[in-house]
Image: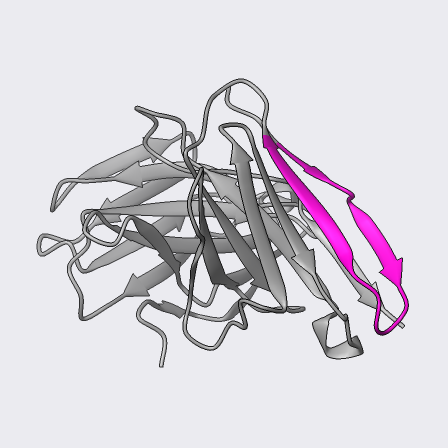
Amino acid sequence: GAVVSQHPSRVICKSGTSVKIECRSLDFQATTMFWYRQFPKQSLMLMATSNEGSKATYEQGVEKDKFLINHASLTLSTLTVTSAHPEDSSFYICSAKPQGARGYTFGSGTRLTVV
Amino acid sequence: TQLLEQSPQFLSIQEGENLTVYCNSSSVFSSLQWYRQEPGEGPVLLVTVVTGGEVKKLKRLTFQFGDARKDSSLHITAAQPGDTGLYLCAGFKAAGNKLTFGGGTRVLVKP
């Protein structure tokens, strides 16, 4: 089946630094990928839609200058959390839908802790 | 207010009992998907329902899509501890090309 690989699985960073999270579609091409954020015991909230070769589309309330998205190839999207603060600590998950598939494939998530 | 309302938010039952999770909306969706998520992992697709009134079975799990394509339910028969997890419904609208998740139902099946 389709696989989406997300890296790193866990990261701890200091306040004020930036962190990059990678999302790769391993056996299919993805012109569109999606980035979600999930707080403990809550559901997934869509942050942005990453589009290959063009600008990402951000959901209302998500700061595009803080959460930089780059989708430079058909198999890779990156999310960079810039100038991280403790309130950015969360579980970040990416997803993509292989062509013809009935549902989305999700990465295994990245647990970000900002100290 | 969430576009998709899931109920209950939490369900604790004994092994062997049955359970039903509901997913309701005032919006019509092109399709509705059910996912199961374990702690520290991404959601895994269980099923996609597309046609109003559709019923799909996956072993002990039965999924139903409402006639008007606004609501869905997940029924688990004879639940087992391995069914423990966060169950998420998600509606897809082709026009927006994105998935909207319900609030999730946390299921705990005690041995």
Compared with A67, A3 (above or below) is above
Compared with B5, B111 (above or below) is above
Residue B99 in percent (x, y) is at 36, 52
Residue shown at 18%/51% (left/top)?
B95
Residue shown at 73%/78% (left/top)?
A87
Compared with A66, B75 (above or below) is above
Instruction: Give the image quarter of residue B91.
Output: bottom left
Compared with A96, A11 (above or below) is below
Residue shown at 77%/56% (left/top)?
A19
The residue range painted magenta reads: A5-24
Magenta residues: mostly which secondary structure?
A: strand
Residue A94 in percent (x, y) is at 56, 46
A77 or A25: nearer the viewer: A77
Any part of residue A48 in sight: yes
Instruction: Give the image quarter of residue B3.
Output: bottom left
B35 or B21: nearer the viewer: B35
Instruction: Give the image quarter of residue A54.
Output: top left
In the image, residue B13 lies in the stretch drawn in magenta: no
In which quadrant is the N terminus of chain B drawn? bottom left
A31 or B18: nearer the viewer: A31
Residue B74 in percent (x, y) is at 36, 50
Residue B21 in percent (x, y) is at 39, 59
